[in-house]
Amino acid sequence: MLDVRSERLARRFRLWDTDGNGHVDRSDFEAEGRRIVAAFGEDEQSPRGRAVLDAYLAMWDYLAAKASLQPDATLSAKQFDRIAQTEIILMGNTGFSDVLRPTISATLDLCDTDGDGQVNPTEFRRWIEAIGVTKPHAEEAFDQIDENHDGQLSIDELAQAVRDYHAGLLDIPLLGR
């Protein structure tokens, strides 16, 4: 199980390490938030755009603090794996609720273009294509996450899927490259 978790965290790390320098920093987290906001044509300064960017930056700040880093420091892949394993994955629901759920919630609010409190297949695809998942994988992931087959994803379904994926309990394509 640990190898699956580390492999998925390594993939997540590579997605954030857009310049390929082997380190991630605050700007890498911000860049992903910006890609998601741009994918929905939202202004970064709007309440929904700002919420996504703030959530991504809060996730970085949390991880950096747990690694005892200064705000302008970087995390190596090894440091990222250790901190994510310890502070998120091994903490179970608490780790995911504290660190990832705010980001998922802000992103869901942005993605929910029809305002129904849920993400439909089109909204979901736009979101995860912005983080590097291809269209066929996005459709496959949606179908697997939508456990009640109502054609919508709630925050609870999304948060559980992200948690289970990173914990090695769910094998769906949630990350690209």
Image (cartoon, rainbow, N blue to C red):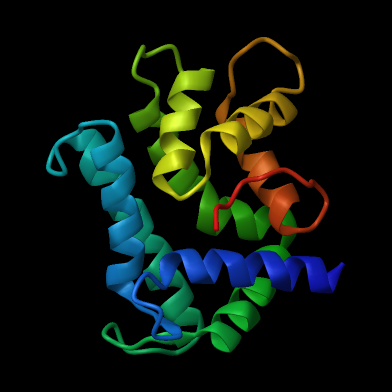
> Image check: 80 left or right of 170?
left
Q: Is residue 71 above or below residue 87?
A: below
Q: Is residue 51 above or below residue 10?
A: above
> Image check: 144 left or right of 26?
right
Q: Position of residue 32 (x, y in %)?
A: 35, 56
* Figure label count: 0
Q: Quadrant of the N terminus?
A: bottom right
Q: Position of residue 111 (x, y in %)?
A: 38, 28
Q: Residue at x 55, y 53 (%)?
A: 176
Q: Position of residue 61 (x, y in %)?
A: 37, 71
Query: Quadrant location of residue 37?
Result: top left
Nearer to the camera, 151 or 71 = 151
Query: Quadrant location of residue 71?
Result: bottom left
Q: Residue at x 63, y 60 (%)?
A: 95
Is residue 86 shown to the viewer in this render?
Answer: yes
> Image check: 111 left or right of 104?
left
Q: Position of residue 2 (x, y in %)?
A: 82, 72
Q: Residue at x 67, y 64 (%)?
A: 8
Is residue 119 shown to the viewer in this render?
Answer: no
Q: Quadrant of the C terminus?
A: bottom right
Q: Residue at x 57, y 34 (%)?
A: 138
Q: Is residue 44 above or below residue 69?
A: above
Nearer to the camera, 163 or 131 = 131
